[in-house]
Image (cartoon, helix red, strand yellow):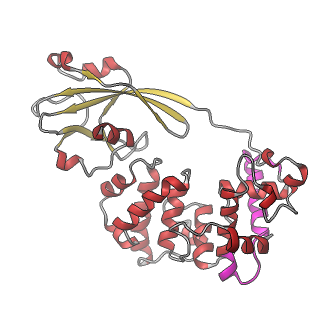
Amino acid sequence: MAQRLVHWQGQHGRHHLPWQHTRDPYRVWLSEIMLQQTQVATVLGYFSRFMQQFPDVVALAQAPQDQVLSLWAGLGYYSRARNLHRCAQDVMRLHGGRFPHTSAQLQTLPGIGRSTAAAIASLCFGERVAILDGNVKRVLTRYLGFDGDLARSVHERSLWTEAARLLPEDDLCNNMPHYTQGIMDLGATVCTTKKPACEVCPLHEQCQAFAQGSPENYPVKTRKLKRSSQSIWLLWATTDDGALWLSRRPTPGVWAGLYCFALFDEPAALQAALPAQLHSQIQTVPTFKHVLTHKDLFLHPVRVEMTRETRPDADGAWFDRSQWAPLGMPAPIKKLLTQ
């Protein structure tokens, strides 16, 4: 299996992505963190902007966190950005600006879990260690006919063992990067969730799911997170010269660490936060939906113009345009401000 994948990756794998064809752990690490729960097409633009702004770990470590969050805005899962910044600082402080070379050492850094550490170590340093992201789970469970329920940790551990068993055994410096990239590429382009292209898969002759005629039955995972919804009222308070009333969102919570309008669970609470003489000046903006991974947010912006001397009864402060423009803000807030 390993040799087939290594050969296939060289001939048919993806070769156009900007974090490929490099053994620079900074670029690989940045791409791996961005790609968690996020599609490649979305990551491409963010990766390019991050590399322009922070070309190496030194630049990222020295940057203010607000600058990092601002550049991350819209990518979601903002704890990734905070951990990214902390990790860069730890690489500088604890490792002299050089990423550790082993997956075990990499896992001691903020935001780097077992699979991400293995990706960096195998792609950059040729370590014989397995990754197990969503694409890889799909390839392996189909190839092996592995029908253990991955919602149970005992089966997840068994799949890790199988993943390690199948790794290349020789010329690791060359084969491990191609194998790791190959199994990710295969899951992303051929062994897809629906309608996999089994006829062009280099592993189909040995694939148990293909032999069974049921590749879409794998992987098995019974526990699914239920989607929920929430309505939020946004106090879009502004002055005639463009200042905004903003506060930094607490951690943990939605949009943690970002600067945002004051949020309220109901319109009455928002109205109560305003002086009575302003109630007649409230402008209601059309409600819109913002989709998170497991939750739909129904956002109700309420706009009101105030003087700087007037303060809503909500945490925050007035920020001039020059102050708020570079801040990290949630994507839907930026969308409102640029309409």
Q: Is residue 94 left or right of residue 258?
A: right
The N terminus - image quarter: bottom right
- Counting from the top left corner in percent of width and height, residue 201 is at 78, 61
Q: Is residue 332 above or below residue 85?
A: above
Q: Nearer the viewer, residue 1 or 64?
A: 1
Residue 77 screen position, x and y as percent: 47, 48
Magenta: main secondary structure equals helix
x, y percentage for residue 136? 70, 58
Was residue 139 drawn as part of the magenta stretch in this picture? no
Give the quarter of the figure containing the C terminus.
Answer: top left
Residue extent of the magenta highlight: 147-176
Left or right of residue 111: residue 72: left
Residue 143 appears in the rendering? yes
Q: Give residue 240's quadrant in the image.
A: top left
Residue at the right extreme of this rendering: 211
Q: Is residue 109 visible?
A: no
Query: Vertical placement of 148 versus 289: above or below?
Result: below
Q: Residue at x 84, y 47 (%)?
A: 214
Q: Position of residue 197 (x, y in %)?
A: 76, 54
Front-most of residues 136 and 79: 136
Question: Quick check: 304 above or below 254?
Answer: above
Nearer to us in this view, 73 or 91: 73
* Residue occupying the point 32% across, 17% down: 268
| Figure check: 325 above or below 103 | above
- Residue ID at (41%, 78%): 96
